[in-house]
Image (spheres, rainbow, N blue to C red):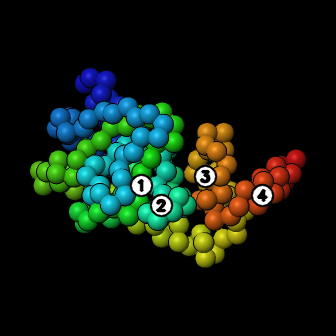
Amino acid sequence: MNDKIEVIFQHLSNFAPLNVNDISDSQPYWKSRKMNKGDFFNMQQMVCNDLGLIIKGIFRIYYQDPNSKEFKNIYFFSENQFVVSFRSFVSRDACWYFIEAMEDSEIFFISYKDLNALYKSHPNWSTFGRLLAESFFNIAQTRTEEFIFYTHEQRYLRLLQAHPNIIERIPAYHISSYLGIKNPSLSRIRKRVELKKV
């Protein structure tokens, strides 16, 4: 088993019950890509054709009004997570969001066509597809519920739980946008959280 298959197997086998044969047969379909900070995995108004597995880096999904420069961060993805606009990927409709690398990153990715070929030929890959759909449904519903049931501080703490070192890796205004607050409010939240640790 070469290094590429080993890296893919390590991450994918933690997510779904894929055996060595499943991974080996999928190897020709997976491609590696190094991305620079600011590169786009997918663009607004384009169909998302690939599912990415992040080996290194942070990505943001964000919406930008075509008539202004204002943006809204929807979600962050980092190491060992899949990055995709899942609705666009499944429906083959244009994506409403941009997906951008926030730092120099590395991913493995597979196309919609190739992944569906694996679904048809390997039962375990069909299970992977179901788990992937459940995962992104959970992400979407959890994100909605956070805005209904959680305070800004609770949402901040949940973000740190999901991405422990994100504060050191991306500018604060991106986190403010994600939380739906302004930078001064984020500063106050961070101070309160730090005081509680003392």
- Crowding at dot 1, Cα within 10 Å, few <14 / some 14-19 / many 20+, comes out as many
Res. 136 in view? no
- In screen coordinates, is 188 left or right of 157? right
| Residue that label 1 marks | 98
Left or right position of 66 against 179: left
Amino acid type of disc 4? Answer: Pro
Q: Are marks 3 and 2 in contact (CB under 8 Å)?
A: no
> Closer to the camera, 69 or 190?
69
The first of marks 4 and 3 along the sequence is: 3
Q: Residue at x 31, y 33 (%)?
A: 32
Q: Secondary structure at mark 3?
A: helix
Q: Would residue 132 be visible to someone looking at this image?
A: yes
**To which residue does mark 3 refer?**
174
Q: Amino acid at mark 3?
A: His
**Could you tell me the amino acid type at mark 2?**
Gln
Q: Position of residue 115 (x, y in %)?
A: 21, 50
In terms of sequence position, does the residue under pointer 1 or pointer 4 come before the other? 1
Tell me which residue sits at (83%, 52%) in the image: 191
What residue did someone put label 2 on? 64
Q: CA distance from mark 4 to mark 2?
A: 22 Å
- Neighbor class of circle 4 (other Cα within 10 Å; few <14, some 14-19, many 20+) is few
Left or right of residue 102, residue 179 in this image: right
Residue drawn 27% across and 58% down? 47
Please state which of the two labelled residues, at mark 3 or mark 2, is closer to the viewer: 2
Residue drawn at (55%, 61%) of the image? 70
Report x, y in % for residue 189: 78, 58
Residue kind at label 1, given as amino acid type: Phe
